[in-house]
Amino acid sequence: MQLLAILPLAMVHTLGNLFTNMSLGKVAVSFTHTIKAMEPFFSVVLSAMFLEEMPTPWVVTSLLPIAGGVALASTTEASFTCDICLLSLYDLIIAFGNMAGLWSAMASNLSNQSRNVLNKKFMVKKEVYQLTVFFNNKFLSKMPF
């Protein structure tokens, strides 16, 4: 019964790893980690949506520098190009790979923070023991689905 409760956590954990690796394959490591710095933003949004924990004004205010810093760093990233007027097929392929890397990193953020919110939901309900959740999540996330 506990494995069925932990299975969604393992699946989201696997997706998070998959999206991170996809992003690392498409864009520079520094750019992937810059985008992944938005994880606190995703955590606050998902906690508000699923746990009904409304953030305080201080928390929202603290997210502004994070979002601004990620936006600034992303627009000035040397390896990231997404020009509107592309000159050649090669430029189009590079721009598509860059966008795929960006959205993979964003999907990784969403997956990893979904896992954290689900984990917190399990801990509040006391459905399973914390160490059991950790072990089975790591074990199940390595299984092919």
Image: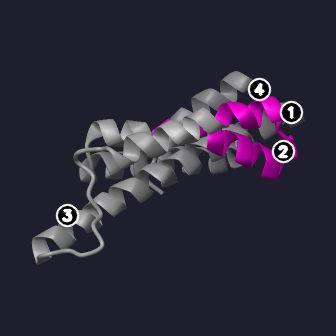
Label for residue 51? 2
Q: What residue type is labelled 2?
A: Leu
Which of the two labelled residues, at mark 2 and mark 3, occupies the earlier sequence position?
A: 2
Label for residue 5? none
Look at the numbered disc 3 and give the secondary structure of its residue. Answer: helix
Label 4 close to label 3 by CB (< 8 Å):
no
| Cα distance between the residues tagged 2 and 4 | 20 Å
Residue 88 falls in image quadrant:
bottom left
Residue behind mark 1 = 124
Label 2 close to label 1 by CB (< 8 Å):
yes
44 in the magenta segment: yes
Magenta residues (range): 35-63
Which of the two labelled residues, at mark 3 and mark 1, occupies the earlier sequence position?
A: 3
Classify the position of the N terminus by image quarter. Answer: top right
Where is residue 7? Give x, y as percent.
64, 48
13 lies above or below 66? below
Q: What residue appears at the point 84 percent right and 45 percent down from the top-left corner? A: 51
Where is residue 122? Give x, y as percent.
79, 38
Which of the two labelled residues, at mark 2 and mark 4, occupies the earlier sequence position?
A: 2
Where is residue 37? Give x, y as percent.
50, 35
Which of the two labelled residues, at mark 4 and mark 3, occupies the earlier sequence position?
A: 3
Q: Is the magenta stretch mostly helix, strand or loop?
A: helix
Q: What residue type is labelled 3?
A: Ile
* Nearer the camera: disc 4 or disc 1: 1
| Cα distance between the residues tagged 4 and 3 | 47 Å
- Can residue 128 be seen here? The reply is no
Residue behind mark 4 = 129
Residue behind mark 3 = 94
| Cα distance between the residues tagged 3 and 1 | 45 Å
Q: What residue appears at the point 41 percent right and 38 percent down from the top-left corner? A: 34
Look at the numbered disc 4 and give the secondary structure of its residue. Answer: loop
Horizontal relation, residue 25 to residue 143: left or right: left
